[in-house]
Image: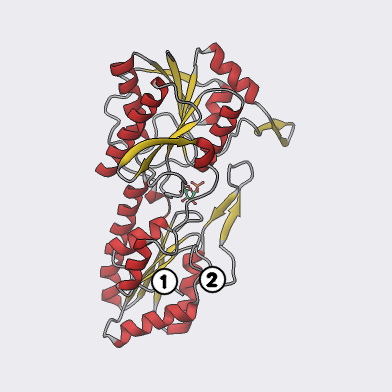
């Protein structure tokens, strides 16, 4: 029976991380008498041995708090770890150092709370023979083998709230208002928030858009007497035959591509083509910050409890997941085998079409 586990949060933060940490610590201590060691700043803390014991006091009051009390990082892969040599950065394999740190701290199993980048690293650690359990986190909801990641619903709510606010100002000024949201290469946030917030056009990476088709949707609204329109665009959206807009490359990150800028690109073109005044809002990290909603608190708690249960059941190399309404475990290898994109026959997409939302195609 495992007596001491380490937990870390890796990749971009999201609402609900603290709720998972709390559930893991409480369930470990109350139900199984397992000790928990917190690892700071994601995999950096694993390599640099930044460890702290987590007891009931350390997690007191964190359920509604955004961010992560452990800190996180979307760099610092132990298998390709950035090291300064003079004025150069070289990348070294520091995984042996990390495992030695775990051994000397008495950590027998790692619970990695992360998105696809962190869970890919977790899978590599499992492949080295060290026990690992994964917990699916990301506002993007793009992790395969689970129906939902925690953090996503709160991000959708934030985006929906922004759309509600943009509606009122769009209507007053007879403008096109565009909201650019996150989601990386998947359109889950844009699609769900677009439906919840009554967007007139939803642009997602899975459906390359045609500007002409978008103007047709906007013109139809004008003909119906609607002098304004609200558009939500996923940061990964791209024109038919074109590319996603990359804001910059950031070397050393698990994914060096930083998307951003599609909202302005679409906005400029639509203003020229329709003659309607257009404004663009980039929602950015507001989607990642703040208190998790009750759905994400509950999902995060269920995931935390299930992760500890998996530890005590002797499971290894798995990720806790939601399938339908049930929490289960799936092999980590399956979870990181591909990203989960919006299927073109997804019921939400069909519903969007059915109620006349323009999808740019
Ligand atoms: O994966 C979460 C996410 O917020 C994406 O939606 C977004 O593309 C990316 O992280 C932004 O990363 P950063 O915090 O490094 O700007």
Mark 1 burial class by Cα count in 10 Å: few <14, some 14-19, many 20+: many
Q: How many marks?
A: 2
The structure residue drawn at horizontal position 53% and vertical position 56%, both measured from the top left corner, is 259
Residue closest to the eye, 258 or 96: 96
What quarter of the picture does the N terminus occupy?
Answer: top left
**Mark 1 against mark 2, which lies toward the viewer?**
1
Q: Which mark is residue 37?
A: none
Picture coordinates of residue 25, whole percent (x, y):
34, 22
- In the displayed structure, would residue 118 be above or below residue 226? above
Per the image, label 1 sits on a secondary structure element best described as loop
Picture coordinates of residue 82, whole percent (x, y):
65, 34
The structure residue drawn at horizontal position 56% and vertical position 38%, both measured from the top left corner, is 120
Residue designated by label 1: 359
The structure residue drawn at horizontal position 43% and vertical position 81%, both measured from the top left corner, is 215
Mark 2 burial class by Cα count in 10 Å: few <14, some 14-19, many 20+: some
Residue designated by label 2: 239
Distance, label 1 to label 2, CA atoms, is 12 Å
Of the residues under marks 1 and 2, which one precedes in the sequence?
2
Residue closest to the eye, 265 or 325: 325
Quadrant of the rendered image containing residue 295: top left
Query: Along the horizontal axis of the image, is 168 left or right of 234?
Result: left
Query: Along the horizontal axis of the image, is 325 left or right of 9?
Result: left
Residue closest to the eye, 154 or 279: 154
- In the displayed structure, would residue 264 be above or below residue 68? below
CB-based contact (under 8 Å), mark 1 and mark 2 = no
Report if the beta carbon of the residue with label 1 is closer than 8 angstroms to ligand 1: no
The structure residue drawn at horizontal position 35% and vertical position 62%, both measured from the top left corner, is 347
Picture coordinates of residue 36, whole percent (x, y):
40, 18
- In the displayed structure, would residue 168 be above or below residue 45? below
Asked if residue 293 shows in the view, the reply is no
């Amino acid at each position: 029976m495992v007596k001491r586990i380490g937990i870390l949060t890796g990749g971009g933060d999201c609402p609900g991380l603290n709720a998972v940490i709390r559930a893991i610590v409480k369930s470990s201590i109350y139900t199984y008498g397992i000790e928990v060691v917190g690892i700071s700043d994601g995999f950096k803390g694993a390599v640099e041995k930044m460890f702290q014991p987590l007891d009931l006091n350390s997690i007191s009051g964190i359920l509604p708090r955004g961010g992560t009390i452990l800190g996180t990082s979307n760099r610092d892969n132990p298998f390709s770890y950035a090291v300064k040599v003079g004025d150069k950065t070289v990348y070294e394999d520091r995984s042996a150092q990390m495992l030695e740190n775990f051994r000397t701290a008495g950590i027998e199993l790692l619970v990695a709370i992360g998105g696809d980048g962190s869970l890919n690293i977790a899978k590599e650690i499992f492949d080295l023979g060290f026990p690992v359990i994964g917990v699916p986190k990301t506002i993007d909801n793009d992790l395969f083998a689970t129906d939902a990641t925690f953090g996503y619903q709160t991000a959708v709510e934030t985006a929906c709230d922004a759309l509600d606010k943009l509606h009122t100002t769009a209507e007053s000024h007879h403008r096109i208002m565009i909201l650019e949201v996150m989601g990386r290469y998947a359109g889950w946030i844009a699609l769900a928030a677009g439906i919840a917030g009554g967007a007139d056009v939803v642009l997602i990476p899975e459906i390359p858009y045609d500007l002409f088709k978008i103007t047709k949707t906007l013109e139809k609204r004008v003909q119906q007497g609607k002098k304004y329109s609200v558009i939500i665009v996923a940061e990964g959206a791209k024109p038919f035959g074109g590319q996603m807009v990359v804001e910059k490359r950031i070397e050393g990150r698990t994914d060096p591509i930083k998307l951003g800028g599609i909202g302005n690109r679409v906005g400029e073109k639509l203003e020229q083509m329709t003659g309607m005044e257009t404004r663009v809002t980039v929602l950015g990290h507001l989607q990642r910050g703040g208190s998790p909603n009750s759905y994400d608190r509950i999902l995060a708690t269920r995931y935390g409890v299930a992760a500890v249960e998996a530890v005590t059941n002797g499971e290894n190399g798995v990720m806790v997941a939601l399938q339908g309404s049930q929490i289960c475990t799936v092999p980590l290898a399956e979870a990181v085998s591909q990203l989960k994109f919006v299927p073109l026959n997804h019921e939400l997409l069909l519903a969007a079409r059915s109620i006349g939302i323009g999808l740019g195609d």
